[in-house]
Image (cartoon, rainbow, N blue to C red):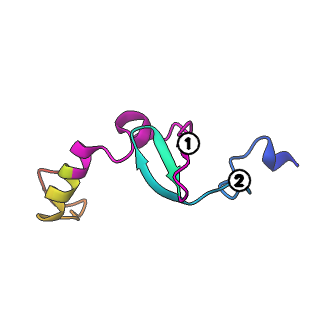
Amino acid sequence: MIKNHIIYNAFNPWQFEISKAEGSFLYDKSGKQYIDFTSGWNVTNLGWNNPEVNEAVAKQATRNVYSPMWASDPIR
């Protein structure tokens, strides 16, 4: 079928449940390691579960998690 050759389909039969992720690796519930070849923007630039990003997100979450587009918030 054409959708299997041209269009990205997020509902493939080979999906698995991710139990953890680090760097460029994903792990399933049984601990099997997979290399992430999806080239998602965030994982390509930062890796999965990047400690520096996690710390920044947690720090910001204690201050403000939302800023409307019309507000002048320095973090925006």
Q: Is residue 53 left or right of residue 29?
A: left
Q: Residue 32: percent from the left, percent from the top?
A: 55, 48
Element type where label 1 sits in the image: strand
Packing grade of label 2 (10 A; few <14, some 14-19, many >=20) is few
Regarding mark 2 in the picture, which secondary structure is present there? loop
Q: Is residue 64 magenta?
A: no
Q: Tell me if label 1 and label 2 are in contact, CB under 8 Å.
A: no
Q: Which mark is residue 34?
A: 1
Residue at the (56%, 36%) spot, across then down? 37
Task: Give the residue at x 74% y 57%.
Answer: 13
Question: Is residue 49 found left or right of 53 in the rendered image?
Answer: right
Q: Is residue 24 visible?
A: yes
Front in this rendered view, residue 71 or 22: 22
Q: Nearer the viewer, mark 1 or mark 2?
A: 1
Disc 1: CA contacts within 10 A as few (<14), some (14-19) or many (>=20): few
Q: Nearer the viewer, residue 8 or 56?
A: 56
| Near-viewer residue (75 or 62) | 62
* Residue 76 visible somewhere in the drawing: no
Q: Can you identify the residue that label 2 sits on?
A: 14
Total labels: the figure holds 2
Q: Residue at x 25, y 59 (%)?
A: 69
In the figure, is residue 69 to the left or right of 62? right
Q: Report x, y in % for residue 26.
A: 49, 47
**What amino acid is labelled 1 in the image?**
Tyr
Instruction: Report the magenta residues as a range.
Output: 29-54
Q: Residue at x 51, y 52 (%)?
A: 31
